[in-house]
Image (cartoon, helix red, strand yellow):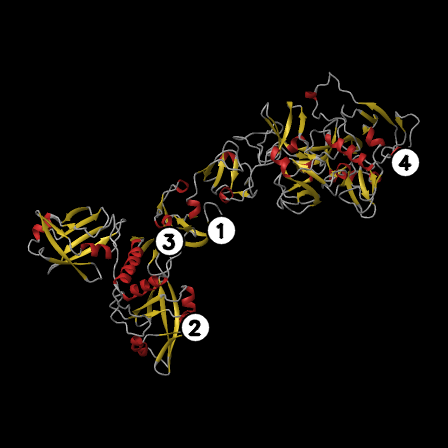
């Protein structure tokens, strides 16, 4: 057996240590350092007694060979009994009268406790049985079990509490050895204060009472008050009130409260409890529990609730603390609060965090100077989150919204709830992308779905894809849907317009009976200068309120009145939709109508907008539907939700998943699978691409979030554009537009002329929409009531620019110009 050795305090040489570096054999011996021999020359002759703590002395012969002194005969038996092996560290200390005390440490430098003594105060037949003498082989097994238990325990002090660092393992010896370990630990308990011990019997664990030891009856007898009383049991910071009673035969029993105490502390059969009287005046007992069974393979940290294999365990209660929480930083200097240091408060509390803004129960870091209070999880959140499934760039932790992005209220791009300026959040500066802290760290976050993946998720190719490709696509949709009804008005003779002898002329069309309509062909001119025209779409169909273009060039016109109809709208639209044809109102048939005056209007029940074009009406329910909404399909596919199809349903007061605005009227398209996804019908109708005179290229519709670094402005109104709202953008020119600046009221045709004498002056008034270009632009003033408006329908004189608001126009207009069932244009 090879050993490494050295002397401790060489001046006195009272102690020396040895490290075993080879296996123990029957021929093993141990050499004593020369310095130690020199100081104890007379004592180290013949035989000495080695004494481990809590055990009897072992006789070992001292042998001198060639000037060296060895422990030889009896040493192998000593080493085997105490399970010494490679790496064991032994400290020898000379006492007196040929006695040497030996302290044994394992490979982790932890002292092994071999104590097997019992409490001399215990009586036979009481709650804790005395450990009887057993044969050496059995004793050796018990010592090994105790050694393993002690070896897996490291005593340390942390934050003022004495803790044991324990490694979870299932190899703790047999059940009997575990019981003996608990008994011996309880028996070795020493205190100058009175105490008694209870060994948990099956009746104590399953019942509601337990009998007090006879040796402690005298103490309880002093408190006897009419045969009963109460005591306080305390473990750590928790306490329990337990009643006791005296019965016949002078027996004392713990009764009321005992069941709660043993349930809260998970007492099992063969566990041993020590009750130490701390304060006789208040009858306060400190309770120490020695568990008979080994701890589980894993622990739950009482601070962070994580499942761990290593933990610090309190010796006085059942609290376990993982290594991370046990060694975590108590004082934190955080970039999010640079003014002062933050102090850890490990006790959980329910409070609103100053970082994430959420109310939750958690440990916390607090600033004792300014009362800044944040969740521990927020304080320890990573500064950078690598590229995740829901975003293609890393996200950085920021402590408020940058000043340049505070023009608008910002939403989290995952949950779509508000992100407040003062809260912490994760942010991608390349994309102007904001995410709540809780959403960024959540494993339930929905990943990005590519076009290829979307085809595999919900393959419904027969459904119409929205947004539609271009501006003319909505009129194409009306034609396609009408074709599905297989209604040929002229063939069935149901048209309100008789088949003319000359197909190029329609006399007395139901929508314009005063003048004939002449069929013309739309043609573009190379001399057209769009820069001098504020509206590219000057030729609008009075029926469907869609542009007349070279895609469908044939149209009918009354040039005198500026009245235009697509040839399809004039001759092919069904005058009545049969029952079931409309997905919005399938229970009744719908009849085609139009207001008599160009400024007359009806409100569409589907989109919520007013229209002065064709509309369908249910005669039974008085429901009116704009022609473009009447032909929208029941189920569609939309680019913003590639996973599933969307179905039409009444509005639900929810937030539109595309515009982030609340849907308060009309209908919406919603996903039947994803309950949180819905789109307002207005967002469905916006075309994917549009042309505008301010840009040489077609601009593209972008659903939020539009990833753009920095801030950008609308080319029309020159106001800042919110990347979390619908917008149009040209990648080639890097031009952006508010969606409402390009498309205002697509269901209403402006223009028309009505002559009125106002304030003794004649005016030719046309219906227009006035909207201030910027937030601080001057208001539009009505020439009659002198009220100012930033967004309103007006009647404007083409000669002098005189403006009349809708309310004033209604007052000065002859009542004969009003049509029953229609109204004046409203605000």
Disc 4 or disc 2, which is closer to the eye? 2
Question: Marks 4/2: CA distance?
Answer: 92 Å
Q: How crowded is mark 2: few (under 14 residues within 10 Å), some or many (20 or more)?
A: some
Residue 210 location (% of width, % of height): 38, 73
Which element is circle 3 on?
Answer: loop
Query: Horizontally, is 490 left or right of 673 in the view?
Result: right
Q: Mark 1 points at which residue?
A: 359
Disc 1 or disc 4, which is closer to the eye? 4
Question: Marks 3/1: CA distance?
Answer: 38 Å
Question: Which quadrant of the view contains residue 75?
Answer: bottom left
In the rendering, which numbered label is found on residue 492? 4
Q: Where 441 falls versus 152 (above or below)?
A: above
Indicate which disc, 2 or 1, sits on the residue closer to the N terminus: 2
Which element is circle 1 on?
Answer: strand
Front in this rendered view, residue 786 or 654: 654
User: Is residue 827 shown to the viewer in this render?
Assistant: no
Q: Name the residue under label 2.
A: 208
Question: Marks 3/4: CA distance?
Answer: 88 Å
Disc 3 or disc 1, which is closer to the eye? 3
Front in this rendered view, residue 684 or 84: 84
Q: Name the residue under label 3.
A: 169
Residue 212 location (% of width, % of height): 34, 74
Q: Where 73 falls versus 195 (above or below)?
A: above
Query: Horizontally, is 147 left or right of 497 in the view?
Result: left
């Amino acid at each position: 057996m090879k050993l490494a050795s050295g002397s401790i305090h060489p001046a006195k040489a009272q102690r020396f240590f040895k490290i075993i570096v080879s296996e123990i054999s029957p021929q093993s011996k141990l050499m004593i350092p020369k310095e130690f021999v020199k100081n104890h020359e007379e004592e180290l002759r013949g035989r000495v007694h080695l004494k481990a703590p809590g055990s009897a002395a072992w006789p070992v012969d001292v042998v001198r060979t060639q000037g060296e002194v060895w422990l030889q005969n009896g040493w192998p038996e000593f080493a085997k009994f105490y399970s010494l092996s490679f790496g064991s560290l032994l400290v020898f200390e000379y006492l007196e009268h040929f006695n040497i005390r030996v302290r044994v440490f394992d490979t982790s430098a932890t002292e092994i406790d071999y104590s097997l003594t019992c409490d001399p105060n215990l009586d036979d037949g009481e709650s804790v049985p005395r450990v009887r003498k057993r044969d050496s082989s059995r004793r050796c097994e018990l010592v090994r079990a105790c050694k393993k238990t002690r070896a897996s325990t490291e005593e340390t002090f942390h934050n003022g509490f004495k803790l044991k660092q324990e490694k979870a393992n299932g190899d703790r010896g047999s059940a009997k050895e575990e019981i003996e370990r608990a008994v011996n630990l309880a028996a070795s308990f020493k205190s100058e204060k009175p105490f008694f011990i209870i060994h948990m019997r099956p009746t104590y664990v399953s019942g509601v009472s337990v009998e007090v030891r006879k040796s402690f009856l005298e103490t309880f007898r002093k408190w006897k008050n009419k045969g009963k009383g109460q005591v306080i049991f305390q473990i750590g910071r928790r306490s329990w009130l337990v009643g006791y009673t005296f019965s016949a035969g002078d027996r004392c029993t713990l009764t009321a409260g005992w069941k709660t105490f043993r349930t809260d502390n998970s007492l099992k059969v063969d566990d041993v409890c020590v009750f130490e009287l701390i304060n006789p005046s208040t009858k306060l007992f400190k309770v120490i529990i020695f568990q008979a069974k080994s701890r589980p393979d894993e622990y739950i940290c009482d601070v962070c609730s994580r499942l761990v294999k290593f933990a610090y365990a309190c010796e006085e209660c059942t609290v376990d603390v993982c290594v991370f929480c046990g060694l975590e930083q108590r004082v934190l200097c955080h970039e999010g609060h640079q003014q002062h240091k933050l102090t850890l408060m490990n006790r959980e509390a329910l409070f609103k965090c100053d970082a994430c803004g959420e109310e939750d129960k958690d440990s916390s870091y607090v600033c004792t100077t300014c009362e800044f209070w944040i969740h521990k999880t927020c304080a320890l959140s990573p500064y950078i989150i690598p590229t995740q499934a829901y975003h293609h760039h890393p996200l950085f932790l920021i402590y408020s919204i940058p000043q340049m992005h505070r023009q608008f209220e910002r939403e989290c791009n995952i949950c779509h709830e508000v992100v407040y300026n003062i809260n912490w959040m994760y942010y991608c500066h390349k994309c102007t992308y904001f995410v709540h802290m809780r959403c960024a760290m959540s494993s339930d976050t929905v990943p990005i779905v590519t076009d290829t993946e979307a085809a595999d998720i919900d393959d419904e190719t027969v459904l119409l894809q929205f947004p539609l490709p271009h501006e003319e696509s909505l009129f194409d949709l009306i034609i396609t849907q009408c074709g599905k009804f297989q209604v040929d008005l002229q063939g069935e003779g149901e048209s309100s317009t008789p088949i003319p002898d000359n197909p190029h002329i329609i006399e007395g069309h139901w929508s314009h009976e005063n003048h004939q309509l002449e069929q013309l062909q739309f043609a573009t001119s190379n001399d057209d200068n769009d820069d001098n025209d504020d509206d590219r779409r000057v030729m609008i169909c009075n029926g469907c309120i869609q542009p007349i273009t070279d895609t469908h060039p044939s149209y009918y016109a009354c040039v005198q009145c500026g009245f235009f109809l697509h040839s399809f709208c004039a001759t092919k639209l069904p005058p009545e939709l049969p029952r079931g044809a409309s997905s919005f109102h399938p229970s009744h048939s719908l009849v085609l109508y139009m207001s008599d005056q160009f400024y007359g209007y009806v409100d569409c029940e589907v989109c919520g907008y007013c229209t002065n074009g064709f509309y369908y009406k249910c005669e039974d329910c008085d429901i009116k539907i704009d022609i473009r909404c009447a032909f929208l399909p029941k189920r569609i596919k939309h680019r913003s939700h590639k996973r599933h199809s969307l179905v039409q349903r009444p509005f639900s007061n929810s937030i539109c998943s595309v515009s982030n605005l609340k849907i308060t009227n009309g209908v919406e398209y919603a996903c039947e699978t994803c309950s949180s996804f819905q789109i307002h019908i207005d967002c469905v109708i916006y075309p994917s691409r549009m042309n505008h005179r301010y840009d040489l290229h077609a601009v593209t519709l972008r659903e939020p979030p539009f990833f753009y670094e920095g801030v950008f402005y609308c080319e029309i109104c020159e106001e800042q554009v919110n990347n979390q709202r619908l917008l149009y953008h040209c990648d080639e020119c890097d031009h952006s537009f508010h969606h409402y600046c390009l498309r205002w009221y697509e269901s209403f045709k402006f223009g028309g002329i009505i002559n009125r004498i106002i304030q003794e002056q004649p005016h030719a008034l046309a219906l227009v929409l006035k909207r201030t270009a910027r937030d601080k632009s001057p208001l539009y003033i009505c020439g009659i009531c002198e009220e100012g408006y930033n967004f309103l329908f007006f009647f404007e004189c083409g000669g002098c620019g005189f403006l009349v608001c809708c309310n004033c126009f209604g007052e000065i207009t002859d009542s004969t110009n009003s049509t029953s069932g229609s109204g004046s244009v409203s605000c």
